[in-house]
Amino acid sequence: MFGAARIRTLLLLLLLLAASSDRLLCAQQSADPQDDAAIKVDRAHATDWISDIDGAWRVHEGDDPAWAVPGFDDSAWERVWLNDLGPSRPGWRWFRLDLKVNENHPDFALLIEGGVGVYELYINGVQVPGPSLKSSFGVNRPVERVIPLDVPGTQVNLALRTYTPANYAAWHFPLFMTASLGTVGGIEFQRKQEESERLYALIPSAVINLLLVLAGIGVFSLHRSQRNHNEYLWLGLYLFLVGAADLLWYFQQGGYLPLTANFLVADPLLYPITLAQIEFTFGFGGRRPGLPWRVYEGLLLLAPVLALFTWLGRLPSAVYMVTEPVLIVPVALLLPIMLFTWYRRGNREAGWLILPSLLPAATMSLYDLGTLSILFGWQRFEFLDNSLQLGPVPIEPNDLGNLLFLLAITIVIFFRFTRVSRDQARAAAELGAAREIQQRLVPASLPELSGFHLEAAYLPAEEVGGDFYQVLNQPDGAALVVVGDVSGKGLKAAMTGALAIGALRALAAENLRPAALLSHLNDQIRDTQDSGFITCLCTRIEPGGAVTVANAGHLSPYCRGEEIPVDPGLPLGIASGIEYKETNFQLEPGDTMTLISDGVVEARSATGQLYGFDRTRAISAQSAGGIASVAQAFGQEDDITVLTVTRRKAAGASTWK
């Protein structure tokens, strides 16, 4: 089947060559000077042939239905060639052509390659179906269209009524590329050939940009595994928008979408694409854009208005084509310089991104230079707007830059994702270990105390906090209630807290007084800790309600709505040989002693106001859960720990259970 198709194609080509040698018979201008606008077409037998009819057309600006009448005198109109009209100009124009054909002519057809939606065709004064004028939203670049020429007689008048919208003329599209007359078979063969050329040039670009879209979707999925790395979102958005915008652009250039697909969608997307590139670069470098970059991003978001003004004809296309590269030059120049600076300052990963960041901006700038050279007639640089021929495959320079960028960024993101995944796995292991340790720092339940009611509330600011509390029985029937806060967060703080609790339990078995216990605990923490400290409040409660308090840099307890004045002392782990002082007071039936961490006092509102000691004192008589909830609602910034001990009013047993 493939061989037969090639043979048929070869035969058609031979017929076309034979027809071209007979052009003097098929399509020649009349020698009669009074009939110089006519083209005689004479063929005695029907074969597949075509002939250009670009010449001998007459053109006139304006719009008048009478200009479609076959007998209208257009001799005063300007004579033009359709394939040499140059860039179109906005407004109305009519084109007319007279043809003479033989009475025994075969079935003819016209092939007109003209702008979609910018012309109507009249044959002998009758409008033919098919080509029609459309609104500015529906026009498109010149595309081939076949129109049957089934008219009686030998006189054929063709009249083209055209209207060029401002957005069509802005991109310097011609109204018509070419016009041909021929037999039905010859014209259909020519149409398929031209359509194949458009499609063939479109396929490589479509494949490359579809890869970009799919790559963007794939990068979005990476964010699901590393949600705190927003650079994946910005990179995914960048790749997706680049691929989608270029697909719209190439399908519009190929004649499959109207101009608005590029003018009002694809081209304005260049600015969000640039913004996404900026955010990705800063996110990749672990930084935030400063005020100048934020102002620049705001300009990028406003820039699409320029495309709208150009589409409406209120801004010259040349001005817009100059403004567009000027707006993206800062990204093309500054981002690689910024990445190199970060690299020199120790961010090794920033060096990976320097070359990939140059590729899209460089190829886009070269393409824009080629486009400007066409608009301004700089023939030396017009080649930059042409596709590159890689063997039989044509590739646009912009697509080549995007493809190289995709390959480079895939390698960069692979190593970045692998490194971050390892870090996350290590952090997850540390977090799991810290959770296990913290279960020892904060008991799930408190022991029951006859004659007393104990309640605790713990709200960590992060997944693992540094606060702890313990209730420990003493050999003489008393109990120790201890609340502490380890400096720092995470696994290290949890391990320090676990160390403190281990030492605390061992010392509690010696039935030490609170001051002596803190002194011994301080020495042990000092001997085992290289850095950091622990604040700790130790209280000893006798069965009869007598309370002894020693403090190592922690917040004082509260009772009866007032702060109990105790000597603050130094936190544990700062210096060796510290002696702590004790304070004694009595819990009467119905009294509540409240122990808190600094997460209550240092709660901060959205306006930056601290909760403070006055508010804390005012709620100190509430339940532990109530105090913690109030502080959290105000604005939690640190771990919140509250432990209350209330002496019951009813008489109880004198021993602990």
Image (cartoon, grey):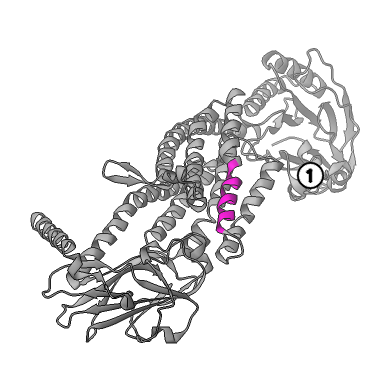
Q: Which structural element holds mark 1?
A: loop
Please say whether residue 227 is visible from this viewpoint: yes
Could you tell whether 74 is left or right of 25 in the image? right
Instruction: Please provide the residue range marked out in magenta.
Output: 317-329
Any magenta on residue 324? yes
Quarter of the picture holding the N terminus: bottom left
85 lies above or below 152: above
Quarter of the picture holding the C terminus: top right
Could you tell whether 30 is left or right of 380 in the image? left
The picture quadrant where one finds residue 542 is: top right
Mark 1, residue position: 604
The one nearer the camera, 337 or 581, is 337
The one nearer the camera, 217 or 341, is 341
Residue at 64%, 56% in the rendered image: 302
Any magenta on residue 179? no
481 lies above or below 91: above
The picture quadrant where one finds residue 97 is: bottom left
Could you tell whether 497 is left or right of 223 in the image? right
**Overall secondary structure of the magenta stretch?**
helix
Please say whether residue 230 is visible from this viewpoint: no
Q: Residue 245's spot in the image, x, y percent? A: 46, 54
Residue at 50%, 29% in the rendered image: 352
Could you tell whether 429 is left or right of 518 in the image? left
Mark 1: amino acid: Arg
Q: Residue 281's spot in the image, x, y percent? A: 56, 38
The one nearer the camera, 587 or 433, is 433
Q: Residue 364's spot in the image, x, y percent? A: 49, 44
